[in-house]
Image (cartoon, helix red, strand yellow):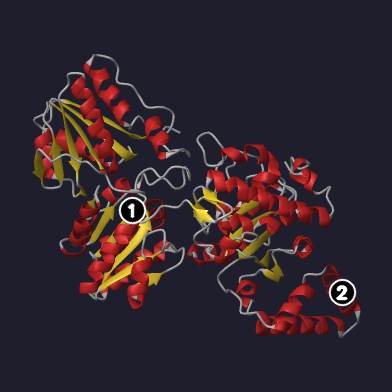
Amino acid sequence: MSRLLEQISSPEDLKKLNIRQSEALCVEIRDLLLRLISKTGGHLASNLGAVELTVALHRVFSTPEDQIVWDVGHQSYTHKILTGRREQMSSLRKKGGISGFPKPEESEHDAFIAGHSSTSISVANGLARAKSMKGEPGYVVAVIGDGALTGGMAYEALNNAARNRDRIIVVLNDNDMSISKNVGTLAQYLARIRSRPEYFAAKDHVNRTLRKVPGVGEPAARLLDASKSMMKSALYHSTLFEDFGFQYLGPVDGHNLENLCAVFARAKAVAGPVLVHVKTVKGKGYTFAEKNPDAYHGVSSFQVETGNPDISGQDSFSVHFGRALSALAEKDTRICAVTAAMKYGTGLQEFSQKFPERFYDVGIAEEHGVTFCAGLAAGGELPVFAVYSSFLQRGYDQLIHDGAVGGYHLVLGIDRAGLVGEDGETHQGLFDAAFLSAIPGVTLFAPVTYRELEEDLEAALYRCRGVAAVRYPRGGECTGLPVPFRRLDGAELYGRGDILLVTYGKLTGQALKAAADLEERGLAVQVCRLTRLLPFPKEAVQAALAKKEIWFAEEGIKNGGIGQMMGARLLEAGFSGRFFLRAAEGFVPQATVKEALQGLGLDGDSLADWVAGAENGAEHAEPGEEGKR
């Protein structure tokens, strides 16, 4: 371990270092991050860019009395290293290890969990208000990336945060989007001057002196303030934040530790809310990541020397979805593709290149994305919104009010449906089937092969009305599926038997494995795979009525899920046999997908034991703690 890092076990240790030592510490931290993430995977480029910023924050502020809210939380790795978790970082994103996001249960220095974006200013507003109401000391700092500032919730928060004049400091980590056009030499010079303590001292001295001059002092001071605002508006175009009631400081070089510390100290001295604009380089210090930050945003393991990230190749549902959509768009000029800052993640890069006039990246604004699609549909277009399952949650009201109520035909490509693994609770795609099932008129497909994906996408576009969705998991297709014993409308049956094991999506492979295991134990089990979840296939219910036992396994949330829907349909139809349901009953923490399935009791071995246990008269075993938090 490097010498300086060995001395840091808490933020207070950091304050014992001088500025030059702190700069050297930044080099060590960046090296540690690179070595660490190359082995564990995680968010690389964003963390490399926020090293000096984080060190400066912990030099100037004192957590946990001062609270830092990270937005999005994937840029908080340096924060974790500085707050006593350096030795645990090798367990990053592993089961039982350190989370890839801030987590209050993990450390008192983590003020709030943050897996989704654009929430920090709202959270900081609430924390600062609570401090003021209780008379508690300390500042609240919201660190928000420029990408997160594309989310409308951030502006709702800005509109409210300055109202009470609490001690709230918003740090805008600007590493990509050009929020201010201040790139001229004079603007850069003024930024450097305004970041120096001497500038702040002189400015305060002039204001105090002017206001003491009888008769003319106060008007002169106001004139000076007005002139300063006019110059800043002309040079920085920064009045947006000031119109919200924030004092604007910056822009400041996010890799100049001395200037960062100075501007943060200045922010503490301001009475009322402050916004500090910090310019950083995403992927700073690692050439490959600096040149291509998108490729190094979230990575699995990779070779540091070659810069070859071990990212998924062309064999994934995301890529095949994008290709299928592009093929359909070749024939139909009404098809539009929409994404919320996830062009590459959702496989739409090919579409964006072929049809730039019909491709729309709305930024991190899922709510707008859904309603924008409804507007496109109302105008006669065929919009397809490709979005991660966990991010679609943010557009739920819009799906109901702006899509379903009006009957507008928009299509959702729900990526990362089901368990996603190491990103943990905030990113598991366990809720989409349940919350869509409550919306009248929704059609929901669950393909398990690439061919089915193509067929379902075409059906969603041309054979459905209203909101239609195709949900598919992270990774690749199910292979080796047997020939169905019988095809139903919205379902397929495999094998024969009085016991029926029902599931959908990628869990089909586990169900078939369990059925084969049970057959060796002398139990004949038929597997029913639902190919369409909504509207629930009536023929599947009719086929199930003839069985004495039905076991439903669902890679989703139990309450309000598809399993409970089938149970209700069976009850209404007079089913008199036994019905069992296994699904997630709470938030599922970080782990590999395999580990999470085992923890939920949804892997093939566990499903077989579940069914066999009840058949042998034992109490049917419950899954582990995962999914029951």
Secondary structure found at label 2: helix
Q: Closer to the camera, 406 or 38?
A: 38
Residue at left offset 62%, top offset 59%:
286
Q: Closer to the camera, 553 or 49?
A: 49
Q: Decide: is 240 above or below 258.
A: below
> For residue 352, what is the image quadrant?
bottom left
| Horizontal and vertical percent position of residue 497 | 12, 27
Amino acid type, mark 2: Ala
Amino acid type, mark 1: Asp
Q: Decide: is 292 above or below 182.
A: above
Residue at left offset 18%, top offset 46%:
536
Q: Closer to the camera, 250 or 333?
A: 333
Residue at left offset 30%, top offset 71%:
336
The mark lying in front, picked from 2 and 1, is 1
Along the polypeptide, which appears first: circle 2 or circle 1? 2
From the viewer's perspective, tell me whether residue 249 is left or right of residue 365. right
Residue contact at pointers 2 and 1, CB within 8 angstroms:
no
The residue that mark 1 highlights is: 315
| Horizontal and vertical percent position of residue 467 | 25, 60
For the C terminus, which image quadrant?
top left
| Horizontal and vertical percent position of residue 417 | 34, 48
| Horizontal and vertical percent position of residue 188 | 72, 78
Residue 526 visible at all? yes
* Count of numbered labels shown in the rendering: 2
Q: Decide: is 254 above or below 529.
A: below
From the viewer's perspective, tell me whether residue 141 is left or right of residue 270. left
The residue that mark 2 highlights is: 202
